[in-house]
Image (cartoon, rainbow, N blue to C red):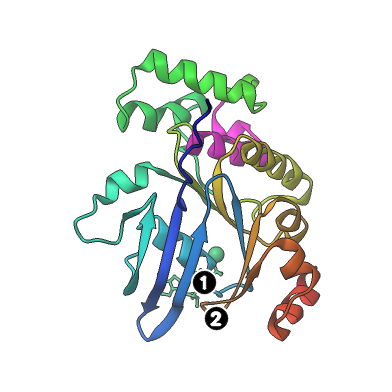
Amino acid sequence: MSTAAAPEGPVLRMEEVRKSFGTSLVLRDVDLEVAPHTVTALIGASGSGKSTLLRCANLLEEVDDGAIWLDGEEITDPRADADAVRRRIGVVFQAYNLFPHLTVLQNITLAPRRVHGLSRADAEAQARELLDRLGLGAKADEYPDRLSGGQQQRTAIVRALAVRPRLLLLDEITAALDPELVGEVLNLVREVKDEGMTMVIATHEMTFAREVADQVCFLDAGVVLERGTPQEVFGAPREARTRRFLRRIV
Ligand code: ADP
Ligand code: MG
């Protein structure tokens, strides 16, 4: 007899998250729910609050109000261990992700060895396996400045995955790349999705968001103005502001 697995709760949940910088209110009562093995795309104009939302989720910014849960544990609780939380969340930013004085392999094995206590041999074996699987095996012993921008960002993704995070946050990871290098990075994100990773992705790549996201959130001045499936948000946006944004960007 097969036993049904208990339904999994959301990996990430935000409730009425509010964040100001000085007098400017940057996130206004943001609610968000990210189900396991799904991709959420955050879209919206520059300054709409996408990066701040990601930084709050990773406790790089402290929220002013509201609450955030990771796997059902409230991480905005003052008693939560922020370092332990960050170890469960991988993050890749727009640029300058890699340590320039370390090889690809050393970049990837650093956190598994230092933070998670893996032996050098185990960390390297795991890193090589991950690099091979994700098409970067030949680059293991190169330094970042010998890699293209696309290879650097792919390495940064591999490095974030090396600690087996519960959640991966990607913030405009193709924004600094030459157009011909964008595709290889987005292809890697597709593979990571196919492996079941839960992700929240801030992006200006609308075609990519439409194809890869399970949920799309349109941020406007710190408010999630519209959310839904890609078909809903891109195909039949309800809000005039969403329509205007999409007309401008697509
Ligand atoms: P996005 O990623 O959508 O471009 P951000 O989250 O970076 O938006 O920024 C949202 C707003 O918050 C902007 O007006 C930005 O200037 C402001 N902001 C972001 N970070 C800071 C900070 N550390 N100090 C002051 N203002 C900030
Ligand atoms: Mg940003």
Q: Nearer the viewer, residue 6 or 16?
A: 6
Per the image, label 2 sits on a secondary structure element best described as loop
> In which quadrant of the rendered view does residue 183 lie?
top right
> Any atom of ligand 1 within 8 Å of the CB at mark 2?
no
Residue under label 1:
49
Count of numbered tags: 2
Can you give x and y, in whole percent of width and height, for residue 173 in the image? 60, 51
Front in this rendered view, residue 46 or 133: 133
Q: Position of residue 36 (x, y in %)?
A: 52, 47
Q: Tag 2: residue type? A: Ala
- SS majority, magenta: helix
Left or right, 40 with respect to 240, comes to left
Report if the beta carbon of the residue with label 1 is closer than 8 angstroms to ligand 1: yes
Q: Please rate how many residues cluster around mark 1, counting C-alpha atoms within 10 Å: few if below 14, some from 14 to 19, many from 20.
A: many
User: Mark 2 sits on what residue?
Assistant: 221
| Residue range highlighted in magenta | 142-161
Q: Is residue 56 above or below residue 155?
A: below
Q: Position of residue 8 (x, y in %)?
A: 47, 46
